[in-house]
């Protein structure tokens, strides 16, 4: 069992025990028929047992997703040429993938980011870090360091060198794609 799940389970069990302890020390079901226990230490201990659960409950709200924006790198500022930058990336097994969203939907990327319609982003990845989109597209780097694409709805349009300038694709990216509406991709059936 995962340690985080174990910690959450322990916090929940302590909260239930704290609630029962507090409830019974205040008189339980027959509160109106008898006087409650005059010892407030038991109530304080019960409340202390409930507090970690309340802190967990109110602090575990879902985080707002980050909106991805255009993120080109200016190689002149870094002081590298395109060839030097490619060599540096290949030595570190890092790949950059240009993805432009031309659908009418906002896409969720890896459950924590948003790619809004008609915007693009360059994703930096390696062979251990796949990229998942909410419309079912998956991008993986395989063992031979080639890009594998899972696209069951035929939405990917691959961009060649002729289309790099038309779509403002930086020249240092490894692969460039457009995500189109379903069945508008360039996959051959």
Image: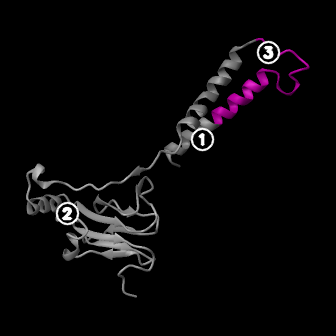
Q: Are marks 1 and 3 in contact (CB under 8 Å)?
A: no
Identify the element where label 2 is drawn.
loop
- Residue 170, given in percent of the width and then of the height, sits at 20, 63
Q: Is residue 69 above or below residue 86?
A: above
**CB atoms at circles 2 and 3 under 8 Å apart?**
no
Judging depth in this view, the residue of 161 and 43 nearest the camera is 161
> Which residue carries the number 3 mark?
37
Asked if residue 41 is positioned above or below residue 70 in the image, the reply reads above
Given residues 189 and 87, the one toward you in this image is: 189
Instruction: Name the residue carrying label 1.
Output: 9
Residue lying at 55% horizontally and 42% vertically, measured from the top left: 6
Name the residue at 77% across, 21% down: 25
User: Is 98 one of the magenta-colored residues?
Assistant: no
10 Å neighbourhood of mark 3: few (<14), some, or many (≥20)? few
Find disc 2 in the rendering and name its residue: 170
C-alpha gap between disc 2 and disc 3: 74 Å
Helix or strand or loop: what does disc 3 sit on?
loop
Instruction: Give the percent coordinates (x, y) of residue 187.
Output: 36, 82
Q: Are marks 1 and 2 in contact (CB under 8 Å)?
A: no
Secondary element under disc 1, as helix, strand or loop, is helix
């Amino acid at each position: 069992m995962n340690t985080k799940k174990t910690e959450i389970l322990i916090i929940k069990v302590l909260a239930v025990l704290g609630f029962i302890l507090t409830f019974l020390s205040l008189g339980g079901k027959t509160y109106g028929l008898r006087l409650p226990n005059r010892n407030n230490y038991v109530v304080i201990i019960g409340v202390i047992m409930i507090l970690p659960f309340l802190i967990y409950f109110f602090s575990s709200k879902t985080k707002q997703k980050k909106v991805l924006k255009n993120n080109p790198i200016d190689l002149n500022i870094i002081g590298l040429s395109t060839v030097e930058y490619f060599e540096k990336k290949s030595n570190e097994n890092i790949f950059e993938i240009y993805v432009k969203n031309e659908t009418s939907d906002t896409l969720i990327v890896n459950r924590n980011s948003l790619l809004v319609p008609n915007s693009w982003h360059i994703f930096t990845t390696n062979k251990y870090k796949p990229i998942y989109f909410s419309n079912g597209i998956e991008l993986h780097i395989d063992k031979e360091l080639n890009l594998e694409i899972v696209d069951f709805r035929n939405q990917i349009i691959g961009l060649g060198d002729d289309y790099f300038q038309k779509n403002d694709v930086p020249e240092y990216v490894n692969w460039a794609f457009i995500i189109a509406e379903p069945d508008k991709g360039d996959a051959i059936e």
